Amino acid sequence: MILVTGANGQLGRRIVEHLVIRLGGTAGIAVSVRDAGKAADLSRRGIAVRQADFDQPATLAAAFAGIDKLVLISTDGPRDARIAQHRNAIAAARAAGVRHILYTSFLDVAADSPAEFAAVHRATEAELAASGLRVTLLRNPLYADLLPMALGGALAGGDGSFALPAGTGKASFVSREELAEAIAAAAAAPALAKDVYELTGQAVHDYHEVAAAVAAVTGRTLRYLPTDAASHAAALVAHGLPDWLAGALANMYAAVAAGRFERVTNDFAALVGRPPRPLACLAQELFGSR
């Protein structure tokens, strides 16, 4: 049986839907969620819904019982809290007899990365390596779904400019929907060719190119202005984001500026059977109605 954690989340729910397609039905699929009531629709479809809270390790033994493959979706929150939550889940999976963990990691896990997300995923990958279990790392690039937040203010009015601390760095962008498809394909596969998959887009782009792609769809003149991480974090806090998230997003873009995301692989196509959509298609999907 395959269990997907965090199945009420934006990525988790999409993975479940793609697993149903891959497996031809809901048999053999389970999910763990904090609030089982929010997954009632999955239960009605025949998916086993189990309550689990990574902050309460006692809830995890029953949630992971009888599971062969665990799709461990990284949690949200401050760095130390996430690392502890992942550690609890890995320990519980091992104790429950789970044989294979597929973990949604991050493309940048370097020890010298400025990104807080890199530290979270590096620590979790180390925990997984020490677990003795079979592990598949599915390293995600930047979510294309974050682009409307980054460019939304520029489209809403003003002079069409938006500021990010990404410098001249380049990155690829893949939607949560397509990442979920690739992760589900890995979970459903009877065998995998390797232990680490870097699920990048087809090409890397800087944010000047992103601005041009979105401008082509919206008909608006857009301009990218590089800024520093501290100023960007302060702006995000002013817009209501919590300090930890504002800082994490700002130093994620600083990692882009440092070239941490400037690579492309064929791993997505190896799992799904086709490449992910290019930037022009993503721009049309995300901004076509604006």
Image (spheres, rainbow, N blue to C red):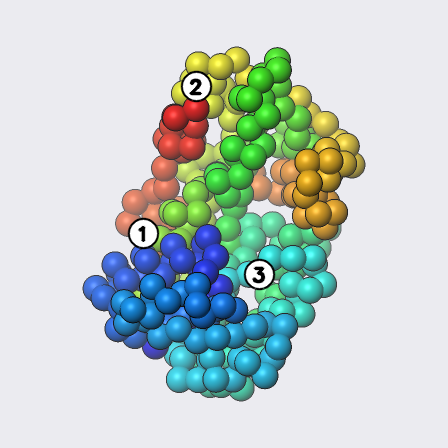
Name the residue nearer the viewer: 237 or 115: 237
Where is residue 72? Give x, y as percent: 49, 67
- Say which quadrant the N terminus sits in: bottom left
The answer to whether any part of residue 70 appears in the image is no
Q: Amino acid at mark 3?
A: Thr
Does residue 141 sit above or below 31 in this rendering?
above
Q: Which mark is residue 75?
A: 3
Dot placed on the residue nearer the N-terminal end, 1 or 3: 3
Query: Which of the 4 image quadrants contains residue 54?
Result: bottom right
Asked whether the residues under the numbered discs 1 and 3 touch, taking CB atoms below 8 Å apart as contact, a structural biologist would say no
Q: Amino acid at mark 2?
A: Thr
Which of discs 1 and 2 lies nearer the camera? The answer is 2
Q: Which mark is residue 263?
A: none
Dot placed on the residue nearer the N-terminal end, 3 or 2: 3
Name the residue nearer the viewer: 256 or 220: 220
Q: Tell me the element at label 2.
A: helix
Query: Which of the 4 image quadrants contains residue 160?
Result: top right
Give the residue pinned by disc 2: 218
Where is residue 124? Give x, y as percent: 62, 66
Q: Residue at x 33, y 70 (%)?
A: 43
Which of discs 1 and 3 lies nearer the camera? The answer is 3
| Residue ranking furthest to the front | 37
Give the residue pinned by disc 1: 272
Q: Tell me the element at label 1.
A: helix
Q: Is residue 93 left or right of residue 216?
A: right
